[in-house]
Amino acid sequence: MGCGIRRPSSFIALVVGGALAACSAPPAPTEGDLAAPDVGVQLFQLPWTAIAQECEETLGPRGFGWVLTSPPQEHIDRVEWWASYQPVSYELETRLGTRDEFADMVQRCDDVGVAVIADAVINHMTGQNTAGTGWAGTPYEHYEYPGLYADGDFHHCGLTADDDIADYTSREQVQMCELVNLADLDTSSESVRAMIGGYLDDLLSLGVAGFRIDAAKHMSAADVEAIVDALPDDTRIISEVIRGGGEPIQPEEYAAFGEVFEFTYARDLVPQVLSGTLIDPEFADPRLGHVSDETAAVFIDNHDTERGEADLTYRDGDLYLMANALMLADDYGTPVLYSGYAFSDRDAGAPTDGEGRVVAAACGGVRQQAGGMGRSPIGGAASDLSTLSDGDRTCVHASTAIAGMLEWRRVAGSAARQPGADEGDAYGFEREGRAVIAANPGSEEQQITIPTSLPDGAYCDVVLAGPRIGEQSACPDGGTITVAAGAASFTLGAAQTAAIHLFSRT
Ligand code: LM2
Ligand code: CA
């Protein structure tokens, strides 16, 4: 009663004022209204102390579920970022921090509800033909790692002239030969498996929740399964298996014992964003050419693809964030955001101090900013993702728009994705009764109405405004979206994304 009365007499207003306020106030979520955080973020080449700070300042408060770190084992002593992918020993001493710092990070992230997933490089050791000394001082040779492995612990495939993988249509080559000269561990060997298991157990003892299995495609699924089977049952495993057309090794083989990174996801969505023709996905599970919903980890880019196949990266500002927002709004897979640093040289490592340690640059928390999409919270000249200088952290995980979409996703929960609507280049869809997103990848302003069962009212765009639950401030100018008569009406500028949810009503 009373909600529709616009101008009650002063007497009635006095008596029912409280009730009126309650009627017009936005609904507040109660226990169970917000799904548990599930989204991950890869904080590429970010030191452990900085990750701990990001957990406390941003990842925990904004509702990320987990963080993927760069590899934590001792690596070759070179300045390129990819030194991390050439293990010398399983000591947790790296350019990104010490063992103690790693342990402290895991604890501090855990304390704010953010699980840590470590990047486990277990297919190989180094690719160095000459003897050297690792970051932490361990001497090594290409096929000799004192106390760990000797020549007999490696595959010497004998299938190609230099033992390097040459033909990806050969299962044997891909799994038994060397990936770019990296000494390939014989992961079928019990003693090698035990050594790897010891390393992973050590990380688990520090509290990590699980692992990204680097280069999983280069180990047989049976080998990876044997290694992870020896770990506690609740260990989370996400295998990196780059799907390749015409290749015999398929990601599905690794989905039998864990999750896998589904490269098809970005390959489907990104061209849509770039061509301005967003369309509904397959609503079947599994989606065509994808692993099943429960086993898929999805991403727009990662540290490899941003240096390779990815056609949308931080450099694309608004359209990049649009793709990430659409991924967060989807009801398929577990989204993994990617947050690295700007670069123009593919090999360039993150900025280091005088001793070669990577500088622990933190993002400083989410900041409300006009413009939302495309804005990085980094201060100074670098206010836009597309205008960063080499070495600047992109801080994608700390942008207002992403924070808003994380809240949106938790409100959407398990509500079904409805068939979308489009108008010109604009497109959008509802998660039934919970939330609506609209995106305009085109270069001209576009209006679009999207069918929804959200209650009539004025809603605040969480892409522009950031999270709205518990937020006292007014919705920023240009952020109000109206729902009436079963439709949400958006006016979207070029490359603009907007999104509303049940609890963003003003
Ligand atoms: C991965 N997944 O399967 C990582 O995501 C990817 O980043 C790794 O490659 C790769 N597998 C091995 O772990 C990176 C980087 C390569 C780099 C390797 C090893 O993309 O460029 O290779 O790490 O550090 C580099 C040189 C390459 C050289 C090799 C061995 O670029 O030319 O090969 O080191 O010294 C002779
Ligand atoms: Ca291998």
Image (spheres, grey):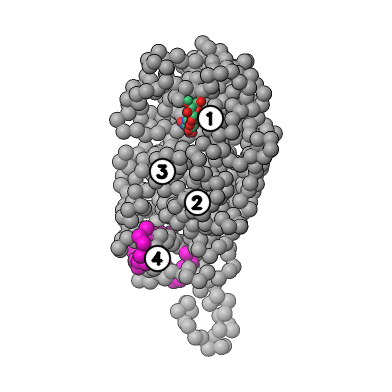
CA gap, disc 3 and disc 4: 26 Å
Which amino acid type is marked by label 2? Ala
Say whether residue 443 is magenta. Answer: yes
Which amino acid type is marked by label 3? Ala
Residue 138: quarter of image: top right
- How many other residues sit within 10 Å of disc 3, few (<14), some (14-19) or many (≥20)? some
**What SS does tag 2 mark?**
loop
Q: Position of residue 107 (x, y in %)?
A: 66, 39
**What SS does tag 4 mark?**
strand
Residue 96 vs 127, above or below: the answer is below
Magenta extent? 434-461
Q: Position of residue 397 (x, y in %)?
A: 54, 50
Asked if residue 377 can be seen in this view, the reply is no
Marks 1/3 in contact by CB < 8 Å: the verdict is: no
Earlier in the chain: of badge 2 and badge 3, it is: 2
Circle 2 is placed at which residue position?
A: 35
Circle 1 is placed at which residue position?
A: 85
CA gap, disc 2 and disc 1: 35 Å
> Depth-wise, is mark 3 or mark 4 nearer the camera?
3
Circle 3 is placed at which residue position?
A: 310
CA gap, disc 1 and disc 4: 43 Å
Earlier in the chain: of badge 1 and badge 4, it is: 1
- How many other residues sit within 10 Å of disc 4, few (<14), some (14-19) or many (≥20)? many
Marks 3/4 in contact by CB < 8 Å: the verdict is: no
